[in-house]
Image: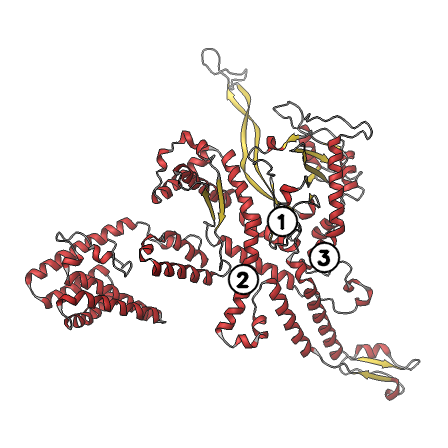
Amino acid sequence: MNEEAPLNKETGKSPWLRLASDAYKSSTSYLDSNYRKQWERNISLFQSEHPSGSKYHTQQYAHRSRLFRPKTKSAIRTNEAAVASAFFATEDVVSVYPVNDSDPAQRASANILKYLIQYRLTKTIPWFQTLVAAYQEALVFGTVVSHQSWEYKEEKLKVKEPLFDDNGNVVLNEDGSEAQNSRDEKTVVKDKPDIRLVASENFRIDAAADWSDPVGSSPFVIEVIPMYIGDVLERMSDIDPKTEEPKWKTLKIGELLEASKKSEFDSTRQTRQGKRQDPLADRVNDVSEYTTVFIHKNIIRKGGKDWLYYTAGTLHMLTDPKPLQDVYPHLRDGERPYVMGTTNIEAHKCYPTSLVEMTQDLQTAANDIANQRSDNVQLVLNKRYHIRRSSNIDIHALKRSVPGGSVMMDDPMTDVQIVNTPDVTASSYEEQDRLNVDFDDIAGNFSQGTVQTNRMMNETVGGMEMLSGQANAQMEYMVRVFAETWIEPVLMQLVRLEQYYETDDIILNVATNKAEEDANQQGTNFQRFGAEEMDELLRHEMTVGVNVGIGATDPIRKIERLLLGIRTMGEINPDIISLINQEEVTKEVFGALGYKDSKRFIASQPQARMEEMSAQLEELGGAVQQLMEQGSNKELDIQGKIVAAQIKGQSDIAAAEAKALGEMKTAQLQVDGQNERDAVKAQLHMIDSRIKAEKNDIARGELLLQKEALVHKMLMDQPDIGIDPEGKKMSEVLLNDEYGSVQGAEG
């Protein structure tokens, strides 16, 4: 197909311009008819303003209460806090998986890409701001749209260098100064991925697009881009190095303004941004570089292929159509650089109902109750009067009603009657509580109002947990839908951008070292993939997962479920416990508690600590062997306690161990020597049971010390079990027993 399509002789316009114009007008008409009024209402409710057309804007309510209870904004803020807690508790929310997990090259590639994505999301992309804003947009409008691309920009700098003659000597000017030669040097000022949110009112798709993939299934996608005239003129003068022609066609400023004036007045934009100047206004005589015009970015599917070009509104072509794949080479076939997500799934509907729309009637009712109660209080405190016509009364004095004041009248009994308004504020508060419960049920919020209203459930801890669980379940549903429909597709495009555009310097300096460490831990030999093969290594097909599950919005609940899962798997197969990645568990626990960096809670040199403990255990083994040769059981018991206390280095721990050792010695003397180890195991089981049942943290600590002291006692009393003949290592009988990890035993 010829990219430079000829003009239509009948209309004098390019067929491409006509296609873009028809697509824009039909999609805009669809939005105007079905969603625009609701969007504007949603914006007003979120901004805690009475929507346009509300009775509170009429003259009838000019002297009445016009309060707005910000229930909607509060609910959205609560949801924003929940999504922030779910996605930013740790820095390892995103995971990258290879399509073929058995391929070591793909596993190594997945490790590299994981750290690249993590680096970009934390260092170069304002990910926190972008994600929270995207979630907010979805709650207000029902959908959120974003554009993913790679930003690259060069600038020419003048570099001055000394001028040398043929002999290599510096050339001097007449005044004796060094002569200099000037040359242009290009400097990269921007080279990074970008995730940009698109305002809902600035995005167009076909009304008949498939609800499961609205962006990909629509025959066209149009983005309305607000731009300063100065930036547009810069694009028109910027030369494309490939074609040596201006990147954008040259248009007059009047043509740009006319295009914006005819097609870009948007009431939704005005509602969102307030009373700012819109292109509908006549600004021909007041134009500056910062005057805003609106440029259309059109992606039109024709001949089974997507074409990209820019237009000034619907009136003028700014660029010739190019295949979308040429502009975005990282995209897969049929893919577009936009993602449209939501927090609510509604089958066969591209624009699902937003949270604001679902609660709008309850918000209106809450406002009415609050304003009626306020009016009632005002009438109770400031009485109304019935005054007989043509009566001789000082009305101004009557209105003032100041303490100690007086009002002149002929007959107070007949001329004036006081209207007593009953106080009904108590019933209004009851109705308000009921509205709060209904609102919270829909919004997925858990509040004290909900608990107070559900009095029967409030009487038990289980009832409160049920209420909280119901609220959290709905909130987590919205978070999960948001992650599936927007976050994961966006990050998948980010992965492809990294695969195609990322520089070798970033890959080597940011990702390689961490990936190698990770690969060594997982048994993947990354070192056999050299830097020369880096580009090829990153080309593997990947999938992206977001590590958000049930309980993600409730930190305590998240930790409880994590530990429950670990305990359950340990009961099914005790050997699994030894395979648990303690580093990842630590990240999740401390992340849920609000600490991103869990490393500072872990010893920085674990290997050195292990070596120290090993040396101490060797010393302990030698002392035990020496005492055994002396044949004094009493001295063995006393010296064993002393050595164990020295290993711990804490007086309180040493005392606890000594006490526990004395108690265990008595228990051991009551059984036969052949059953001594079984008796100790039974004692360990008893201690474990007491630990599980104990609620007091201090008591639990004492029991843990007793358990640890018992293990040390086994080592001292049974050197053939705990220490090998050379006294160099712990016995596998103890390490592989069902009691798990004991502090100091790993040495």
Q: Three-letter amino acid code at disc 1?
A: Val
What kind of residue is marked 2?
A: Ala
Per the image, label 1 sits on a secondary structure element best described as strand
Residue bearing the label numbered 2: 473
Q: How many angstroms separate mark 3 from mark 2 (CA)?
A: 28 Å
Q: Which image quadrant for residue 490?
A: top right
Quarter of the image where the N terminus is located: top right
> Which residue is more in the foreground, 215 or 436?
215
Dot 2 or dot 1: first in sequence order is 1
Relative to residue 70, is residue 258 drawn left or right?
right
Residue at 78%, 34% in the rendered image: 255
User: Residue most toward the right?
Assistant: 390
Q: Which residue is mark 1?
A: 144
Mark 3 secondary-structure assignment: helix
Which mark, residue 268? none
**Residue type pointed to by label 3:** Arg
- Residue at 62% in and 64% down: 442
Kindly report the distance in space between the C-alpha atoms of the residues bearing marks 3 and 1.
Answer: 17 Å
Q: Is residue 211 visible?
A: yes
Q: Residues within 10 Å of mark 2 (few under 14, many from 20)?
A: some
Q: Are marks 3 and 1 in contact (CB under 8 Å)?
A: no
Please give the residue where the numbered disc 3 appears in the rendered image.
Answer: 41
Q: Residue furthest top?
A: 166
| Mark 2 vs mark 1, CA separation in Å | 22 Å
Which of the two marks, 2 or 1, is nearer to us in this view? 2
Find residue 185 and report its horizontal and vertical position in percent: 54, 25
Q: Residue furthest left?
A: 630
Q: Residue drawn 24% across and 69% down?
A: 683
Element at badge 2?
helix
Label 3 Cα crowd, 10 Å radius (few <14 / some 14-19 / many 20+): many
Mark 3 near mark 2, Cβ–Cβ under 8 Å? no
